[in-house]
Image: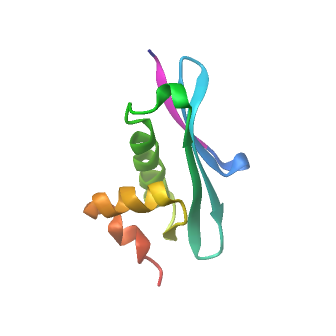
Amino acid sequence: METELRHEPDLARYTLWQDGRTVGLADYRVTPSEVRFIHTEVDPAHRRQGIAGRLIEFALDDVHARTDLRVVAECSYVEKWIDDHAEYQDLLTRGT
């Protein structure tokens, strides 16, 4: 199974693709000081495979590498993921 993670800035979205199909997405909104993650979704047929976690890790690593903006987790999944991964919590306080 071929897996690809993508940042699609024109859609304000990170996606995870398997075999040419989008199976997970994380939508965000950018403000002058923040990247606000507003929604995460995984195709029901692909849940419980760690897709959402891989997607959020990819997205947060990208935000960290590309910007100095603070991350705001409006999405409850992103909020819990960051809570469970202490090494990403600094993203919540950058630029403040």
Answer with left or right where residue 49 lies relative to residue 86: right
Task: Give the residue furthest to the bottom.
Answer: 96
Q: Is residue 88 magenta?
A: no
The N terminus, quarter of image: top left
Residue drawn where x is 47% and y is 24% of the image: 3
Residue 17 can be seen, yes or no: no
Using the rendered image of the protein, determine whether residue 20 is visible from the camera's viewpoint: yes
Question: Compared with residue 90, is residue 45 higher up or lower down, i.e. above or below?
Answer: above
- Asked if residue 49 is positioned above or below residue 74 in the image, the reply reads above
Give me the residue at 41% from left, 78% from top. Answer: 93
Query: Which residue is drawn at the image coordinates 51% and 64% (left, top)?
Result: 67
Q: Can you give x and y, in whole percent of width and height, for residue 5 in the image?
A: 50, 35
Q: Which residue lies furthest to the front in this view?
A: 44
Residue ranking furthest to the left:
86
**Picture mark count:** 0
Q: Toward which corner of the image does residue 8 lie, by quadrant?
A: top right
Range covered by the magenta-colored residues: 2-7
Q: Which of 63 and 42 is in front in this view?
A: 42
Q: Where residue 89 sits: x, y (%)?
A: 34, 68
What secondary structure is the magenta-colored segment mainly?
Answer: strand
Q: Is residue 30 above or below residue 8?
A: below
Q: Which colour scheme is used?
A: rainbow
Residue under the image location 40 percent in, 48 percent down: 57
Residue 21 image offset from top left, x and y in percent: 61, 23
Instruction: Looking at the picture, tell me which residue is in the foreground, 66 or 6.
Output: 6
Q: Viewed as shown, does residue 92 lie left or right of 6?
A: left
